[in-house]
Image (cartoon, helix red, strand yellow):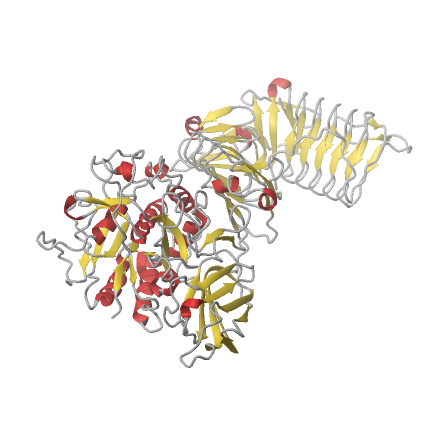
Amino acid sequence: MAEILCQRGLVSSTATLATYYGDTLEKQQWYLDSSTRSKLSIDVYSVWKEYTGKGVKIGVIDSQIDYRHSDLSKSYSTALDFNFATGTDNVTINAAALPASHGTLVAGVISAGAGNGVGTVGIASGATLVGYGVDYAATNAASQIVSALQKSVEVDVANNSWSFVDNFADNFAVNPEYKAGLVRAVSEGRGGLGTSIVFAAGNAGTTGTSNYHNFQNSPYSIAVGAVDSDGKPSSFTSLGANVLISAAGRDVMTTSLSDRYESVNGTSFAAPTVSAAVGLMLQGNPNLGYRDIQEILAYSAHRTGLSDGADFGDGWRTNGADNFNGGGLHFSDAFGYGFLNVHDAVRLAETWTQQQTFANLATVSKTVSSAQTLVAGSNDHISLDILVTEAVNLEHAQLSIDLNWLNSGDIDVYLTSPDGTQVRLVYDLPEESRVGSIRNFTFSSVASMGEDSAGTWKVDIYNRDPAAVDKAGAPLTGKFKGATLTLMGDAETSKNDTYIYTDEFGLLYQGEDLAKRSVLKDANGGVDTINAAAVTLDTTIDLTGAKASSIAGVTLSLTANTIENVYSGDGNDTLIGSTAANILNGGRGNDVIYFSFGNDRIDGGQGLDSLVLNCTLSSVSASLSGSGELQISGKAGEVSSICNVETFRFSDAVYSYDQIAKLLGAGGVSTGQPETPPPAPVTDPVDGGTGGVVETPSSGGATTQTSPYGDAGHTYAANLGGSAADDKLTGTTLGERIDGLDGMDKLRGMGGNDGIHGGNGDDTIYGDDGHDYLYGDAGIDTIMGGTGNDWIFGGTGADRLYGEAGTDTFVFDASDTASMDTIYDFNAADGDKILITGASTEATFEIVTTAGATYLEMHDDGGEFLLARIKGTGMDGLDMTHTDAGLLWA
C-alpha cells in the first residue's frame, strides 16, 4: 500500500516572548500574541478572556497520545478515545514501548494545560481532547484512518496531521471508502451540522503540491499551510489552490513523550492550531455548520505581515467576491486566504447567522468534451471553455481533466473563473518531471469563495518543456479528451447579503482600490447585513445615510436605507438604524445606539452601552420580559426588543436599566401604549409637493364660520380649498379657513386665528400661532395646536392630538365610540379642558386608570366606552361641569 507520512519537520529553538498565563514555556510560543520576535500572531489573548474551548470535543487522528503527560492529562478523555491500531477503547500506555511522539506533539498545540505553571499553553486548553490512535507503519494504516474518520462523527473537530507520501496515492476515484469517511463525518457529525475536518496541507515543498491529495483537497476538509515567523511560507509547506488558511509551522513548542517538550517544524503543527481555533469558534457559536466554519476561517484570515508568496508559487491575487472589506478576498497558493486570526474568527462566529451544512450544499457539474492534442514544441498550449448557467455562491471548485501526459511535472494547468480568478491546479515543478498520472484526478480550488458560479470557466494547459520526447525520440504528445467541472456552495435563491469588514479595511488598501471599496451599494434588495464584528477600532454606521459612516478608520459611503442589520466590534461604536426592521448589535465596547422605532432587535453587547430615543418614556409602550429584555413600541404592530443596554436617553430624561426595570417591573407594562410618534414640527412653510397645491388668500373675500362651537360666526380672511389629492396648504398671518377635502393633506395655519378642516383622509394639521379651531374630520389624523388657546376636534378615527402651548380645549363626540383618540400633552395647570358633546341624559363619565394608562370612559345604555386616552399632567383633580355645548372636564 501507499506510505502515509506524519507532517513533521526538524527540531529547533525559539526566542523569549510575552505571555498571557505565564506557564514556563509559553514565552517560546511566538505565534500566540504580542510577540517581540514576529509581527505575526494568531491574536488569541482577547479571545481567551471568554473562550478556552470548553464543551468542545477535538479528535486527533494520529499516533497514540501520551495522555499521562502532566500538560495533557486534564484535557484528555479516556472515556471517548479509541486506538484503531490495537482495536480497543481501553487504551493504555506502555512505558517500555512508548508510541511514536507525533500524536502527543500535535495534542499539546491544541489543549495543553493553561495557567498550571508548567510547560506550554494549548490554544483551546479547555477543550476535551479525544485520541484516535493509528499506526502509520502498519500495513492497514489506511484502513485504520478510514475507521477513525467514520468515528469522527462523535467529535466536533477532527485533526489530521498526516498525508499520503506519493502524489495521487489517495485518489478517491480509486478508493471511494476514503471519501465516504469524510462524507459521513460532515453529514452526520454534530447532529448534521458536520464535524470540521482539518488537515495539514503537507510537507512536499517543491516535489509536489497539496492539491495532489484528495484528502487534502476535498471540499469537506480544511487544508492548512505553514508559515515562518518572518512571514514567509515555510520551505517545506505544500502549495495549492486547495489551501484554505495558514498558521505557524516552524519553531512550534509543544508537549512530547514522557512529560517532555520539543520545538518542532511541519504543517503537522499548523493544522492543530486551526483545529484549536475551531474549538474556540464553536464555543462562541455551537450552531455553526462545517461549511460556515470554512467560510469564517477564510474571511477572518489576515494577509498583513505575510510575504508575497513562495518562490515557485503564484503569489497573491484578489478574487471576484464583493463582500469582503468592500471588494474581493485576498488569496495565495502558499498561504490560502492568509494567516489564522483567532480574534476575527471568533467574532465572526459569534455573529454568524447562516447555517451551511452538507444537507443544504448546492452542487453543479458540467462535462465538456474535447479532441485536442498537446504536442511538445508545436502545440504547447490548449484550452477549453465550460459554460455554467446555474447560479451558486461559490465555496469550492473541482476539476478533473482527461489528459494523458507522461511528464506531469512539466506542465501547468490553470482554471479561471467567470470573475477572472485564475488558479494553478497542476504545477511545473522545479525539481520533478514526472509526478504521476493526472488523468481524471480531481483537483480543487477554494480561491473563488464568494463568487458567482454562472458564466464561462476556462481551462488552460501549458507544456513547459517544448523539447520533451517520447521513447522513440518523437515530440511528446497527449490527447485531451475533455474536462469535468464541479462547483459547490450555496444555491443563490436569496437576495440577503452579508458584507464583512475587518481591521484590514484600514490597513491593506490604498488609491483607487480603497476608493472603490469605500462605497457600499446593495442593489438587489433583500435583508442585508454589515458584519464588522471583527473590527477593533471605533465604528460608526448610519443606515439612513444622513451621517458619515466609518469602519476601521475609513469613511464608508453607504446608500441610504439599503442595509438593514449591523454587527459592530470591540470599539466604542455608534449605530443608527433606519425605518426598516433592523438588527443593531454593538458587540463589545461602550456603544451608542440610536432608536429608530419599528420592529428592531437591539443588543448593546458587552460594555457600558446607551440607547438614545428621540421621544419621552411616556410616549411609548414599554414592558419587561421575565428574562429582563426590554420591549418598546412606538406604534401598534411595531415592537423593538432591547437587551444589554445600560443607559436609556429619552428626550426628557435619562434612565439606567435598573431604573427602567423598577418602573416597569418584570413582566409589567408602562403607562404608554403603542402609538406612532408625532411628526417633527416643520419650521418652514410647506411647499407644494407632488400632487398638492399651495394657495395664498384669494381676492374672493372673507368667509364666515357656522360651527356650533367657539368659532361660531367667526369671519376668516380667506378660504383655501384643497382637492381629492394629497394637498399641502399653508395660510398667512391673517387667519384663514382651510379645507383639505379628500386625500392625506398637510395643512398649516401659520399666524392668525385659523379654522382648519382635514376632511377625509389621514391628515396632519398644524395650528401654529393664534387661537385656532382645528378639525380632523374623518380619518386617522394628527393635530398640533401650536401656540394660542386652540379648540381641537379629532372627528372620527383614532386621532393623535397635541394642544401644545396655551389653554386648549379637546372636543369629543359621545356618539363616536368606534375609535379612540389620544391626547398626548394634556396639562390641567395650563387650563386645558375636555369637552364632551352629543351625550345622552343617561350617560355618565369618569376618568379611569388601568394598566398604568389614563382614559376618559363613558357609561351609557349598559355599555362602557373609552372615548379618549389622556397623556399629560394634572389629571387627578379633573372636575366635570355642564355648559351649553356639553359636559366640560377642567
Residue farthest to the top, as pictured? 829
Quadrant of the frame with the C terminus: top right
* In the image, residue 44 above or below residue 845: below
The residue shown at (38%, 52%) is 288
Residue farthest to the bottom, as pictured? 472
* In the image, residue 884 above or below residue 404: above
* In the image, residue 771 above or below residue 115: above
The answer to whether residue 809 is visible is yes
Position of 677 with respect to 28 (left or right) is right
Position of 463 with respect to 720 (left or right) is left
The answer to whether residue 111 is visible is no
Quadrant of the frame with the N terminus: bottom left
Closer to the camera, 84 or 18? 18
Q: Tell me where residue 400 appears, x and y as whole percent.
A: 44, 70
Q: Tell me where residue 167 appears, x and y as whole percent.
A: 34, 66
Q: Tell me where residue 629 appears, x and y as whole percent.
A: 42, 37
Name the image quarter holding residue 149. Answer: bottom left
Closer to the camera, 705 or 60? 60
The residue shown at (70%, 41%) is 778
The residue shown at (56%, 52%) is 526
* In the image, residue 301 above or below residue 469: above
Number of marks present in the image shown? 0
The residue shown at (31%, 33%) is 18
Closer to the camera, 479 or 421? 479
Position of 32 with respect to 790 (left or right) is left
Q: Tell me where residue 440 appears, x and y as whole percent.
A: 41, 73
